[in-house]
Image: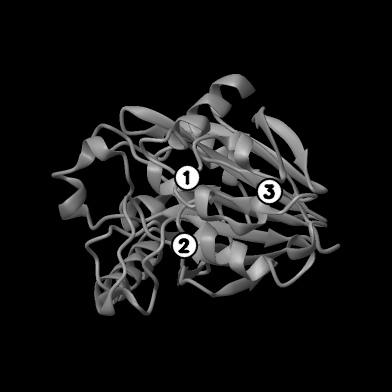
């Protein structure tokens, strides 16, 4: 699997000179399989840039096919959809797996974003590509990848985390993770999902001092991410979903503090990096 980051911020895009190193777009990650198939995780504003990149290949000719895994439908995870160029090309085919309990509920949520009050597109039906919406189950296949989904707490609501497997390699995507109470241990269900992951991408929105005043927003600190990586015995932790107010220097400090937390918790052998727009990992 080749994993590339197209958006790594949380809550709202944060472009500008202070965020240029890590990027200011919201959540979007692409995964290319060994056979070249494509899975996209979340549709934040980074999706626009992924779409522009894809237009140079099969998607620009109406011959593209991809699965999209949607963790939840907060705006920072869906706002790129209306600006995703491949959906306007006839012949392309997208299958979206996401929350909502039924495909009708999820489709209604996405359709609401296209309301004329919010978007000139007016409706998903104005997409030229096939856009097939499905409710994610606990286990399914997406473009030859085996996917397991787990619904975890995200403040007063929930989001889905995904375990994505190919040929014995495991990538876990766990954004927007946050318990509503202080000092909560890692979620056992999420620990099980992430067990032995080659790469664990985990929400690291906050410093602990900032989380203390914004706990109801449902995001993790670097300490939470480190604790999850150690509990799950992940091989590598990737920080993700940085607060929109954090500069590149702030993210650097989060990374250093997260490294110290991993070492203190016994995770000295766990690799660590901070997700950066345009970076690619291969597992």
42 vs 218: above or below? below
Mark 3 lies on a secondary structure that is strand
Q: Which residue does the numbered mark 2 point to in the structure image?
A: 7
Between discs 3 and 1, the one toward the N terminus: 1
Q: What residue appears at the point 31 percent right and 36 percent down from the top-left corner?
A: 184
- Tag on residue 78? 1
Q: Which of the two discs, 3 and 1, sits closer to the camera?
A: 1
| Residue placed most toward the observer, 89 or 192 | 89
> x and y percent of residue 6 in the render?
52, 65
Q: Quadrant of the C terminus?
A: bottom right
Look at 80% across and 50% down and name the residue there: 91
Query: Which residue carries the number 3 mark?
Result: 164
Q: Residue at 76% across / 50% down in the picture?
A: 90
Residue 20 or 224: which is nearer the viewer?
Answer: 20
Q: Point out the tag, 3 or 2, that comes first from the N-terminus.
A: 2
Indicate the position of residue 170 as horizontal and vertical percent values.
68, 54
Give the CA distance from mark 2 to mark 1: 12 Å
Nearer to us in this view, 275 or 261? 275
């Amino acid at each position: 699997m080749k994993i590339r980051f197209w958006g790594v911020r949380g809550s709202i895009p944060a472009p500008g000179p202070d965020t240029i190193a890590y990027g200011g777009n919201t959540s979007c990650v692409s995964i290319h399989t060994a056979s070249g198939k494509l899975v996209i995780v979340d549709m934040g504003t980074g999706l626009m840039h992924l779409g522009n990149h894809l237009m140079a290949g099969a998607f620009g000719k109406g011959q593209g096919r991809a699965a999209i895994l949607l963790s939840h439908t907060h705006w920072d995870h869906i706002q790129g959809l209306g600006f995703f160029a491949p959906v306007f090309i006839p012949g392309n085919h997208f299958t979206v797996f996401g929350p909502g309990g039924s495909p009708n509920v999820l489709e209604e949520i996405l359709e609401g974003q296209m309301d004329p009050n919010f978007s000139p597109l007016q409706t998903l039906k104005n997409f030229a590509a096939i856009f097939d919406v499905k409710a994610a189950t606990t286990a399914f296949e997406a473009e030859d990848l085996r996917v397991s989904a787990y619904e975890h707490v995200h403040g007063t609501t929930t989001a889905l985390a995904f375990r994505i497997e190919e040929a014995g390699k495991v990538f876990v995507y766990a954004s927007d993770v946050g318990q509503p109470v202080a000092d909560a241990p890692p979620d056992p269900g999420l620990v099980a999902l992430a067990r032995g992951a080659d790469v664990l991408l985990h929400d690291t929105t906050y410093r602990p001092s900032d989380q203390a005043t914004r706990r109801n927003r449902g995001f993790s600190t670097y300490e939470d991410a480190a604790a999850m990586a150690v509990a799950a015995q992940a091989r590598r932790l990737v920080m993700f979903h940085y607060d929109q107010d954090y500069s590149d220097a702030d993210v650097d400090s989060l990374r250093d503090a997260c490294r110290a937390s991993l070492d203190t918790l016994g995770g000295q052998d766990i690799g660590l990096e901070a997700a950066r727009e345009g970076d690619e990992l291969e597992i």
